[in-house]
Image: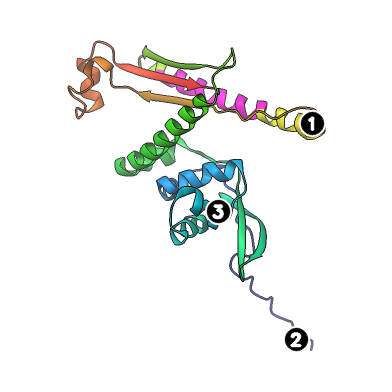
């Protein structure tokens, strides 16, 4: 009788987490609803960094940054791309995977507090991103664009606009994939890659005329009393 060797357990952290492409669970969205995690993802989307480098850039403690990096890695949002010995310790370097999109169901399942936390962090990041880019000429190109458009829609119009926004995002993914393929085929000096910022917002808006008057009033009540029950779309590129 030949004894069978039991399979060895895989050490925690050895198997890279499966990357997320679509978040259907509100718990994942809630886990992301932290300002530092959102900033870490933004930085690692552009350049590889270690927790030490992130802590220096963010002006935060290494312990806090390392904790958030581990959490993002466990969710499959980061991948480990390298290690090196630094001052007697092993320094890990990470990069962000393709950022997954939240499903409508996952977003709807979030509590209002969790939504507000995530929106506040993302809006702050968007403001810094856009204003910093503008300061160095990011909007100087003749076809650069920024728009705030107030619309008056019914429920059917809202649904159609929301669907059009999602379709456009799929077109954006296709355009980026084509550009990435072309850049990989050419030499590093043939075509310079452009870092492009794209912000799309679709939301039920509080009209400027009512700002500061009834901001605590429920949206349904505002729709009944406002002359322009606004839905607003804003995109920047």
* Circle 2 crowding by C-alpha within 10 Å: few under 14, some 14–19, many from 20: few
Q: Residue 171: within the magenta?
A: yes
Q: Quadrant of residue 196?
A: top right
Q: Which mark is residue 168?
A: none
Residue at 56 percent across and 41 percent down: it is 99
Quarter in which the C terminus is drawn: top right
For mark 2, what is the residue?
3
Up the image or down, 171 lies above or below 60; here it is above
Q: Quadrant of residue 148?
A: top left
Residue 51 drawn at (x, y percent): 54, 56
Q: Secondary structure at mark 2?
A: loop
Residue 1 drawn at (x, y percent): 79, 89
- Mark 2 or mark 1, which has the lower sequence index? 2
**Label 3 close to label 2 by CB (< 8 Å):** no
For mark 3, what is the residue?
53
* Circle 3 crowding by C-alpha within 10 Å: few under 14, some 14–19, many from 20: some
Residue 21 drawn at (x, y percent): 58, 42
Residue at 58 percent across and 42 percent down: it is 45
Q: In this image, 33 relative to 191: left or right? A: left
For the record, the magenta segment spans: 158-175
Farthest left residue in view: 213
For mark 1, what is the residue?
189
Viewer-side label of 3, 2? 3
The residue nearer to you, when weighing 86 against 99, is 86
Q: Residue 155: within the magenta?
A: no
């Amino acid at each position: 009788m030949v004894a069978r060797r039991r399979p060895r357990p895989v050490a925690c952290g050895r198997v890279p987490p499966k990357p997320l492409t679509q978040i259907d669970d509100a718990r994942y969205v809630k886990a992301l609803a932290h300002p530092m995690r959102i900033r870490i993802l933004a930085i690692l989307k552009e350049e590889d960094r270690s927790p030490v480098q992130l802590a220096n850039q963010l002006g935060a403690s290494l312990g806090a940054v390392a904790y958030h990096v581990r959490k993002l890695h466990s969710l499959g949002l980061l991948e480990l791309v390298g290690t090196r010995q630094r001052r007697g310790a092993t320094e890990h370097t990470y990069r962000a995977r393709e950022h997954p999109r939240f499903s409508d169901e996952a977003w709807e399942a979030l509590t209002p507090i969790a939504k507000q936390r995530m929106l506040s962090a993302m809006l702050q990041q968007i403001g810094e991103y856009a204003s910093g880019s503008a300061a160095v000429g990011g909007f100087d190109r003749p076809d650069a664009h920024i728009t705030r458009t107030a619309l008056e829609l019914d429920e059917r119009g809202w649904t159609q606009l929301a669907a059009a926004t999602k379709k456009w995002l799929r077109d954006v993914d296709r355009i980026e994939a084509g550009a990435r393929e072309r850049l990989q085929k050419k030499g590093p000096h043939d075509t310079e890659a452009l870092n492009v910022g794209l912000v799309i917002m679709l939301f039920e808006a509080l009209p400027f005329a009512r700002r500061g008057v009834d901001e605590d009033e429920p949206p349904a009540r505002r729709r009944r009393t406002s002359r322009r029950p606004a839905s607003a779309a804003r995109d920047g590129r």
